[in-house]
Amino acid sequence: MSGRTRLALCAALATLLAATSLVPLMETPTWLVQAAVLIGCQTAVGIVARRVPTPRPVTVLAQLATSVLLLTALFVGDRAVAGFLPGPDTVTAFAELVRTGGDDIGRYAIPAPLTDGVRLVLISGVLLIGLAVDVLAVTCRSAAPAGLPLLALYSVAAGIGGGEAGWVWFLLAAAGYLLLLLAEGRDRLSQWGRVFGGPPSTRGRVLGGLESGGGSARPVRTGRRIGALTLGIALVVPLALPALDGGLLGETGRGRGTGDAEGGTISAVNPLVSLQNSLNQPEDREVMRYTTNTPDTQEMYLRIVALDSFDGSAWKPSVRDIGDVPSTFPDPAGLSPEVKRSEVTTRIEAAGWYAQDWLPMPFPASGVEIDGRWRYEPVGRTLVGDHGQTTKGADYQVRSLIVQPTAAQLAEAPAPPPEFKQEFTRIPGSLPDVVEETARRVTAGASNDYERAVKLQDWFAVDGGFTYDTEVAAGSGSAAIARFLQQKQGFCVHFSFSMAAMARTLGIPARVAVGFTPGTPQSDGKMSVGLRDAHAWPELYFEGAGWTRFEPTPARGSTPDYTQPDTPAGSPSTPAGTPSETASSAPSAAPSASESCSVEQKRLDGGCGTAAPAVTAGSSGGGPPVGTILLITLGVVAALTVPFLPMLWRLRKRAVRLGASGGRTDSDAATRVLLVWRELLDTAWDHGIAPDASETPRTTAARIARVARLDTGAAESLRKVAEAVEQVLYAPAPRAAAGLADEVRAVRGALRASMGRWAGLRALLAPRSAVRVVWALSDRWQALRGRAGGGLARLRARFPVRGGAEAP
């Protein structure tokens, strides 16, 4: 294989590895298989064009034309001439697909459905990046600048996906780029001829192995080591830097304060990814413990932050001004002295592993006593760590209010201030009309905002036919809310996001709170809060009561007393359809958080999940084609089979070698004994004792017994096999030796026992001796090249070139 061909293949592979970072953005990864096929065709055209050879611009144009023809056949073949030649109709069809693809990208949340438009944008984008990498690295022979389009491809995925483009995808993209650089370096190095890197190995091919295959092996191997070291540093160094990533419920959020001691801002973050990761942990790890002086803990929701900005793609906290933490917080916005309240004190101890920026507190907090660098955001009444300050191992005390408005007070609440209402009822233009239409249909007959809020809560929790389902896929956009209203399956984030959005369409100020339910009581009187107690709930604003909690999620949390049927009602403003007639059909004595969601249920169901409504819409049709399914199936089978091929090869080889040790005549005794000897050498090699072709069989047996510290019985078995080898090699009349297979099995068992469990597992799953397959293939390839070269020479000799001297 020529250097340019190898470089072109590495460029295509690097592009595909970088494109894998886009996989988390889509619901299905089938587009990547199609992109791989098209990039393969594009690369093949480039390889053939360079072999002709053709001018560089012609090569690039040929590759570009091939890509256009393939895209035409794949996406708009029904409108193309002969199914693949572009025409006027295909241009219009492509423009329409690109337009719809752009709209779908802006409308759907991650992971988005793989519509035809999105698929075209993805595949054509990857093809263009692949062509740019091929042009730079192969056509222009400059692989280093080819990292720029690869970086652009990964940056798009990281920018759109946020936390979805994690270190695994970075590792794949970086490995592809390093592979491209190494291929170019090897190609340039080979043009200088053989490179002498020192004296040859004295151990022969068994120890030299792949290193004996060419003069440039040592520099290339050094390059691989440098690349691996650099990539390792790139992955490890960010882990040592403080607060580079995280989330509201994970280890370290990104809502840190910035600025000097007099001011600053708090960043807008999206907690969905971190919240979902926390709730999907296989173990319900304890996040914190607390004690409180109130006997009723059903209202002790530990609130982290409020998501008050809805831009159509996600709910998130707004960018706010922050300042120093006051000794006593100002009165909550909109809270009237006429509303009943009581102050409680809570002592919270965060776990030593739980390190994130936002401080969990009961709402509304009126004061906090905590050490460290914390800043206060007055609108959300939250505390955020300043420049690396986290909750890790924090021990703090919070004074908070338990606000108990009545149904009458909420029903009679006056309108909020115009500026306040305008900010917290803002909805994006992308919100589907069905959201508002459903909200007005559900709340028909209600005469005030309180009744509308209760009707919405009860519709989600009881009357609307919704089911609690933690398996629904993630999504957080406007269209996802509309689909949730149609599918009626989800968990807390689905319910809270949807109710808050519907309340805003009705003119009720609303936001979403993220935090934890009260947790589970312990025998020592403390409350334990775990990861699976994470929760999201809507807060609606009523003048006089302030921000008020509602609970639309079935089987989670506790339904507030002021929405219960036995809540006093009947004030002059209460209409005939009183709140008691529209309230939840749940029992009047609302169960506590720990009662309505038992520990067993939390562990089995995974608690309140965080993925927003599922995005299931996609391109029309009855599912993926048979070819796609077949490709996916083959890919899965290959992924499950390829890692075990070395093990399967060794098992097969062992059975053949040891099975040949009996049942035959003495005439092939040498063959049988040497097969057994090869199996013994490979068994020792698999356990880390490499063979040495310069040693005699007896010396090799002694070395294996010494290195592995074998017992007397195993050493004796080794000696018997070695003596049998010497006998068949040097005796005038070789004779068969009985029981050698059993001796090898005894040695193998002793090696497995003496070398340790890890070495035995490595010997089974990743046997070192499997490299013999590579050597055999290399020998066959060299032999094939030799025969082909000889045949070509004979043809040239038989049919000499006329009109000039033969080419050398």
Image (cartoon, grey):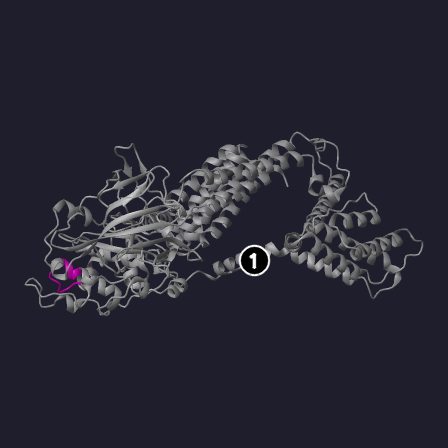
- 732 on left or right of 342: right
Q: Is residue 446 magenta?
A: yes
Q: Is residue 34 above or below residue 786?
A: below
Q: Foreground residue, 12 or 321?
A: 321
Q: Residue furthest left?
A: 572
Q: Is residue 501 magenta?
A: no
Residue bearing the label numbered 1: 640
Q: Quadrant of the N terminus?
A: top right
Determine the main secondary structure of the stretch shown in magenta: loop
Residue at the spot x=25%, y=42% of the render?
377
* Image location (x, y in percent) of residue 295: 26, 60
Q: Foreground residue, 657 or 513?
A: 513
- Check disc 1 and report its element: helix, strand or loop: helix
* Image location (x, y in percent) of residue 743: 79, 59
- What's drawn in magenta, residue-wise? 443-452
Q: Foreground residue, 726 or 266?
A: 266
Q: Foreground residue, 690 or 211?
A: 690
- 168 on left or right of 746: left
* Image location (x, y in percent) of residue 605: 39, 63
Residue 619 sits in quarter: bottom left
Badge 1: residue crowd in 10 Å (few <14, some 14–19, many ≥20): few
- 355 on left or right of 544: right
Q: Amino acid at mark 1?
A: Leu
